[in-house]
Amino acid sequence: MTATIVVGVDGSPGSVAALGWAAAEARFRRSNLRLMYALQVPLTVRSFGESDAVQPTAALRERAECALVEARHRLAFQAPRVQVETSVALRPALDALALASHDAELVVVGTHRFGVLGGRAFGSVGGRLAARACCPVVVVPAGWVSPDHGSIVVGVDGSAHGDAALRFALAEAVHRSAGVVAVRAYHVTLPGAIDNPYAYRKAAEREHRCAEDLAQEAVERALAVTGLVVPVVARAAVGRPADVMIAASRGAELLVVGCRGRGPLHNLLLRSDGQGVLRRATRPVAVVRADSAS
């Protein structure tokens, strides 16, 4: 059975970028595409506190269908051999895409703050979706144009979700004939040595070697598990994880980050570092959980 990539569509610049990225990904993976337009049905409050869903107007349905037809036309040029299906979901985008992820190998959305797909809060939908989705989620920035050549950059930290992100990055590298850069962020611990330059330098060197070794161990572990043959470079960089990953991803085709399981407030991407990556990234970001990695 051919796997399916789900794409959130609403006609916005972010949606167009997501569609282009998903089209290329479908060619790489030989997958089908499912284009989904979410119409959030408003509620009318009746007496005694009950509520009743109001069906979308003909104009809203027409808008949804037009967006899907336009997306199909784009795909006729971008991925003419990829099988495409479309659907209109009568529920909030977050709920619709999370539900669709049960039968998908990947969910792809764009970044923007306005539009039917995500409403004014769409900038955070990618992170919230990753917390609920049953498969990896890719968030594509508006205006994204894939470079001719680039690496896959992945954050590693030795955890299960970090290992899952690394395995996903290796598989993506195979699809794209690219290399992988595995990056571990670290900070320098200086107990009682803040005012001692020599002690600081020694501690910094020790922390760097340790972080680099741990990154290399994660790479060797992932290569052994997957059996893939991919050129991988393990690196360590001092700084906040979000800052390190954004800096490392310059010129990359894709940035991959791990995500600590499900839950609306305990998810890594709803913390400052993870949300900072999604907010500041200038390239597509794949968010992978240990229990959702394909």
Image (cartoon, rainbow, N blue to C red):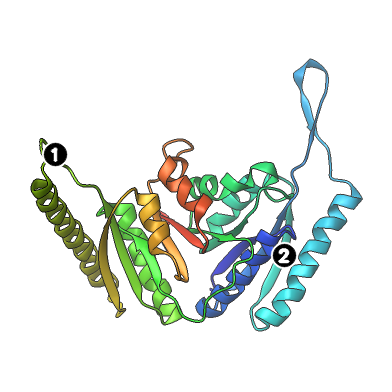
What distance separates the C-alpha of mark 1 from that of mark 2?
Answer: 63 Å
Which image quadrant: the C terminus? bottom left
Q: Residues within 10 Å of mark 1 (few under 14, many from 20)?
A: few
**Position in image of residue 202 (x %, y %):** 9, 52
Q: Is residue 142 left or right of residue 205?
A: right
The crowd level at tag 2 (other Cα within 10 Å; few <14, some 14-19, many 20+) is: some
Looking at the rendered structure, the secondary structure element under dot 1 is: loop
Q: How many numbered discs, if any?
A: 2
Q: Is residue 145 above or below residue 258?
A: below
Residue 69 is left or right of residue 7, and the answer is: right
Tell whether label 2 touches label 1 (CB within 8 Å).
no
> Which quadrant of the structure image shows residue 141?
bottom right
Which residue is at 80% across, 68% downward?
69
Q: Which residue is mark 2?
A: 86
Tell me the quarter of the picture where residue 255 sits.
bottom left
Spot occupied by residue 100 in the image (x, y as percentages of width and height): 60, 55
* Residue at x 83% of width, y 38% of height: 54
Residue at (8, 49) in percent of width and height:
198
In the structure shown, which secondary structural element does the residue marked by tag 2 occupy?
strand
Q: Nearer the viewer, residue 181 or 63?
A: 181
Residue 184, percent from left and from top:
28, 57
**With respect to residue 95, does 84 lie above or below?**
below
Identify which amino acid the numbered label 2 is placed on: Thr
